[in-house]
Image (cartoon, rainbow, N blue to C red):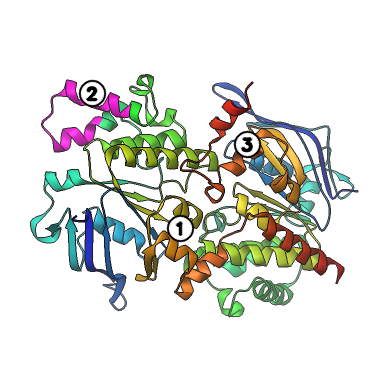
Amino acid sequence: MALLEIKNLTVSFDTSAGLFHAVQGIDLSVDAREVLAIVGESGSGKSVEMLAVMGLLPSSATVTADRMMFDGKDLLGMAHADKRKIIGKDIAMIFQEPVASLNPCFTVGFQLEETLRFHLGLDKDARRKRAIELLEQVGIRDAEQRLGAYPHQMSGGQCQRVMIAMAIACNPKLLIADEPTTALDVTVQKQILELLMGLQERTGMGLIMITHNIGVVAETADRVIVQYKGHKMEESDVLTLFTAPTSPYTRALLAALPDNATGDRLPTVGDFREAAAP
Amino acid sequence: MTPVLETRNITRDYIAGGIVGGRRIIHAVKGASLSVEKGKTLAIVGESGSGKSTLARILTLIDPPTSGELLIEGEPIDISRHGVSKAMRRKVQMVFQNPYGSLNPRQKIGDVLAEPLVINTNMPASERADRAMAMLKKVGLGPEHFNRYPHMFSGGQRQRIAIARALMLNPSLLVLDEPVSALDLSVQAQILNLLADLQDEFGLTYVFISHDLSVVRYIADEVMVMYLGEVVEQGTREAVFANPQHAYTQALFAATPRADVASIKARLARRALQAAG
């Protein structure tokens, strides 16, 4: 049985210009111990569908699905209070802007311990001990002193490490990472990806990696879903995606990588549409 | 031939702190010497804090260097003493990273493009409008876009507008600060193609600031790598990519994700081994 299984998910937003359909009938599933990458450009709906799972969309959004099961529980019919016990505990999420995702008014230690208090009900000493342990686990040195630090006193990479520590605080079964390295320098990106993959391998959690970066997909994914304007273009294992992509859009995306440039000009998605036309 | 852009040992210090706590001097750029020939592209690579944007501000005559010499088309320029003349301003233009932040939301595109002419020339309004329209077409937009506002455009289109604005004064040097890092991959390809076309047509010289090595490898003739304000490596694209000398450059290459099939196979094999053991 899949850890997370979604069938026919649609998300639409009520805007002044009428209904906007951000996600249009997406099926997806991820198993324990699996890394699923969802790839797409801005507007592909990749973040929105995960926010729908987390229940983090604004009230202007309408979410429908035939099925949304997590770990044998039905997320669709679930009461809000029950959902809160799962979200942040068994399903955790990290976001693109680590500095903006942390509350600037509270210390890193306070924010980390908040999760532990809410979901696990640990007492003060146990919380502190676990918080130090978590910071060490995500590779922050002098963890005990850093508990008293505010987000602005840390670098972007360190803030993302703190976010990851918060996300794994309750040993989640599924971690959703929404563009976790986009705002970071490439050398820091490598460290964060290594950290995430190491944690995933050690704990056996499922990992959904939302990204627009083909290189990140190649470095992390087992299986890949490619999306475009709310539709699924392709789903395949990572090797097949790079060796024998089936959808013209994926082929165009791969061809647009500067690494794959052969001539003087880069092929664009537009060129591909023309070439594909009869 | 005189290089379009030349710097000799440029440095830039900032003073941090002040009223409370000790004053510290931060050396943002520690001696950069470079030269770029007409029609060529120099890529400056580095992470946040490497001083690459500080250097860009000096090259575009926004900030003066603390010491060192800046020559544009062979002419020494010292803006701290003599200021910037309109003639100098016309020679160097800049394109910024964020096309959402660099266009005035209350200005129509036609006016955005005409503005550099208003400030720097005495051209009559009708001619300014004609020039703006011509440039709009040059960057792949149409006359129907002339009277629209920036919010009606996508990120890629906005970057085209920012490039068009930079070219309105027929500059010889264009400094592009991360011009494609905010864009989607397929749009990035279009903008890189556009920059290549414009360079050929107008004989433009580019200083291209980026942290994305795959883009740099595609677009650059010369590469300069900066780390903590220092130039740690400098050379032709072929030399730097084939045989990086400095440890930082090597680390940068090692950190760049690999999307080739052999690397993916190796990773999957490692992963299978780990799962089994």
> Do callouts 2 and 1 point to residues on the same chain?
yes
Locate residue A45, reporting x and y percent.
Answer: 64, 37
Locate residue B121, reporting x and y percent.
Answer: 13, 34
- For image coordinates 27% across by 32% down, the residue present is B113
Residue density around tag 3, few if under 14, some if 14–19, many if 20 or more, within 10 Å: many
Span highlighted in magenta in the image = B114-136
Q: What amino acid type is highlighted by mark number 3?
A: Ser
Residue density around tag 1, few if under 14, some if 14–19, many if 20 or more, within 10 Å: many
Residue holding disc 3: A44
Q: Give the side of residue A45 with respect to residue A17, left or right.
A: right
Chain letter for mark 3? A
- For image coordinates 18% across by 33% down, the residue present is B117
Looking at the image, residue B235 lies above or below residue A249: below
> In the rendered image, which quarter is residue A164 located in?
bottom right
Looking at the image, residue B69 lies above or below residue A142: above
CA gap, disc 1 to disc 3?
25 Å
Q: In this rendered view, identify the residue nearer to me: B52 or B1.
A: B1
Q: What amino acid type is highlighted by mark number 1?
A: His
Q: In this rendered view, identify the residue nearer to me: B155 or A93.
A: B155
- For image coordinates 46% across by 55% down, the residue present is B217
Residue holding disc 2: B129
Q: Are marks 1 and 3 in contact (CB under 8 Å)?
A: no
Q: Does the magenta stretch include residue A14?
A: no
Q: Quadrant of the image for the N terminus of chain B?
A: bottom left
Q: In this rendered view, identify the residue nearer to me: A69 or A180.
A: A180
Q: On residue B211, which mark appears?
A: 1
User: SS at mark 3?
Assistant: loop
Q: Give the side of residue A77 with respect to residue A268, left or right.
A: right
Looking at the image, residue B207 lies above or below residue A112: above
> Do callouts 1 and 3 point to residues on the same chain?
no
Q: Quadrant of the image for the C terminus of chain B?
A: bottom right
